Image (cartoon, helix red, strand yellow):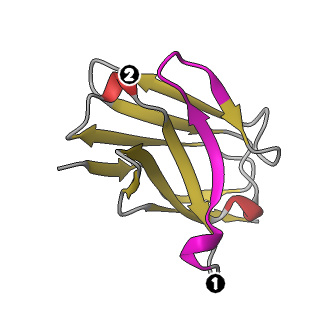
């Protein structure tokens, strides 16, 4: 059974930093691309935005809106993917979700809320 658990959200002032982590179980973690998505308040689940991704080889990809501010990383010993978020802006406010595609199906964590005050 695939399980993803996110931690690290919270309330921060504009310009501040937060670090999110997601611990995965039920998969051979090191073989998978791991993703962080976010869903802004009022948006539907289908409108979740891909924020960052990291492949099994460690290659990364970012949404244009977060390039230069967010950094995704992974720890294959602890089955953990992290998202370091710096220079946060009010428009980064959203629920952040960890995601993995396993056997053709998407798996999601329960999400962690990030709120950036202006």
Q: Which dot marks residue 82?
A: none
Residues at discs 1 and 2 in contact (Cβ within 8 Å): no
Residue that numbered label 1 is attached to: 42
Residue 73 placement, left or right of 64: left
Residue closer to the observer: 63 or 113: 63
**Region in magenta:** 44-60
Image location (x, y in percent) of residue 45: 54, 74
The structure residue drawn at horizontal position 63% and vertical position 41%, both measured from the top left corner, is 52
Mark sitting earlier along the chain (1/2): 1
Residue 114 placement, left or right of 78: right
**Farthest residue in the front direction?**
104
Residue that numbered label 2 is attached to: 75
Image location (x, y in percent) of residue 78: 27, 25
Residue 56 belongs to magenta span: yes
The structure residue drawn at horizontal position 53% and vertical position 26%, both measured from the top left corner, is 55
Marks 1 and 2 sit apart, C-alpha to C-alpha, by 33 Å
Displayed quadrant of residue 42:
bottom right
The structure residue drawn at horizontal position 64% and vertical position 51%, both measured from the top left corner, is 50
Image location (x, y in percent) of residue 93: 65, 64
Displayed quadrant of residue 27:
top left
**Farthest residue in the right direction?**
64
Q: Of helix, strand and loop, which one carries label 2?
A: strand
Q: Of helix, strand and loop, which one carries label 1?
A: loop
Residue 90 belongs to magenta span: no
């Amino acid at each position: 059974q695939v399980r993803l658990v996110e931690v690290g959200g919270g309330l921060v002032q504009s310009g501040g930093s937060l670090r999110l982590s997601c611990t995965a179980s039920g998969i051979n973690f090191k073989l998978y691309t791991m993703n962080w998505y976010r869903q802004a308040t009022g948006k539907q689940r289908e409108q979740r935005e891909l924020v960052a991704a990291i492949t099994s080889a460690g290659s990364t990809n970012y949404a244009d809106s977060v390039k230069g501010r967010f950094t995704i990383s992974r720890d294959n010993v602890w089955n953990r993917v992290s998202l370091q978020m710096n220079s946060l802006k009010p428009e980064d406010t959203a629920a952040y979700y960890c995601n993995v595609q396993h056997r053709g199906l998407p798996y999601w964590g329960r999400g962690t809320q990030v709120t950036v005050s202006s």
